[in-house]
Amino acid sequence: MTSPLLRVGGLTPLTSLDYPGELAAVIFCQGCPWRCGYCHNPDLLPARGPHPVAWGQVMDFLRRRQGLLDAVVFSGGEPTRQRALGAAMAEVRSLGFRIGLHTAGIYPRHLAALLPQLDWVGLDIKALPADYPALTGVPASGVRAWWSLRLLLASGITLEVRTTLDPRGEFTSSSAARDGDFDSRVTTLMYRLAAAGVRRYALQFARGRSGPLGPPLSLRPDPAQSADPQANAYERLGPTLFPHFELR
Ligand code: SF4
């Protein structure tokens, strides 16, 4: 089986962070239809990028890593945007690697078809469903992401849900923009995810500058380095809701 049409924008040859507990390579798939203000991979958003990596090169690299790596993570961009993803995953699995996927859940029907091939998924749930359009620029985007969440929870595949917090940009065009409402939205989101059945959850703060799609961030201090009271509040709440919780 070949997957000549999978468009790849980059490759990380070795990481111990992108697939928990495994040594992995990361394939960055080209293309994403959403435009989150904090996106840090703007080169990967167009369907065709400035530095394409041929699929044959990717497979040659992975053949040389057989026995040295445990897993391969398909990341992006949004990997499920490409119809060639399933065939590409099958090729990679045939080399003996476990398959991980980073997704924002943008294409739940395609995700459903991919489920039998997946060993681990990191799913971005960015906000409550109604707050998504303000963040992604796309109507009804929250419906798609939360549909994907339900699919993954029902599948039993090992799942980590992540939320990136951008106190400057998140929910800015919604009624939640008022001071103080941001934090109540975040805690409501955490309760909703726990009630949905999420067991492993990570909150991560946007750091440094906002992605090139947005203006500089007015950052909340790094929670690991400061006594930011709200970060501490999340840190206290998280373990009461989720068996596995990380504040990054
Ligand atoms: S979903 Fe948002 S953060 Fe993820 S690649 Fe697309 S624009 Fe960037």
Image (cartoon, rainbow, N blue to C red):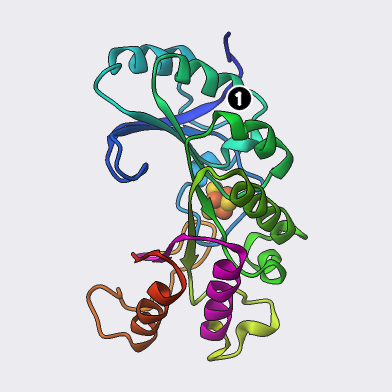
The residue drawn where x is 61% and y is 64% is: 196
Badge 1 is on which residue? 86
Residues 14 and 159: in front is 159
Query: In the rendered view of the protein, which quadrant contains the C terminus?
Result: bottom left
Provide residue 182's location: percent of width, then percent of height: 55, 83
Residue 16, horizontal then vertical, whole percent: 27, 41
- In this rendering, the answer to whether 17 lies above or below 63 is below
* Magenta span of residues: 183-208
User: Can see residue 90?
Assistant: yes
Q: Would you say residue 54 is visible in this rendering? A: no
- Give the structural element (helix, strand or loop) at label 1: helix
Does the segment drawn in magenta span residue 189? yes
Decide: is 200 above or below 65: below
**Residue 188 occupies quadrant:** bottom right
Q: Position of residue 238 (x, y in %)?
A: 41, 74
Would you say the beta carbon of the disc 1 residue lies within 8 angstroms of ligand 1? no
Three-letter residue code for mark 1:
Gly
Q: Position of residue 207 (x, y in %)?
A: 36, 65
Which quadrant, please, contains the N terminus?
top right
The image quadrant that residue 7 belongs to is top right
Front residue of this view, candidates 103 and 90:
90
Density class for disc 1 (Cα within 10 Å; few <14, some 14-19, many ≥20) is many
Residue 133, magenta (yes or no): no
At a point 60% along the width and 68% down the height, the residue shown is 127
Is 69 located above or below residue 207 in the figure?
above
Is residue 157 shown left or right of residue 130?
left
* Residue at the limit of the structure toward the top, as seen here: 1
- Left or right: where 26 falls relative to 112: left
Q: In the image shown, does 211 or 109 lie closer to the viewer?
A: 109
Q: Residue at x 34, y 12 (%)?
A: 63
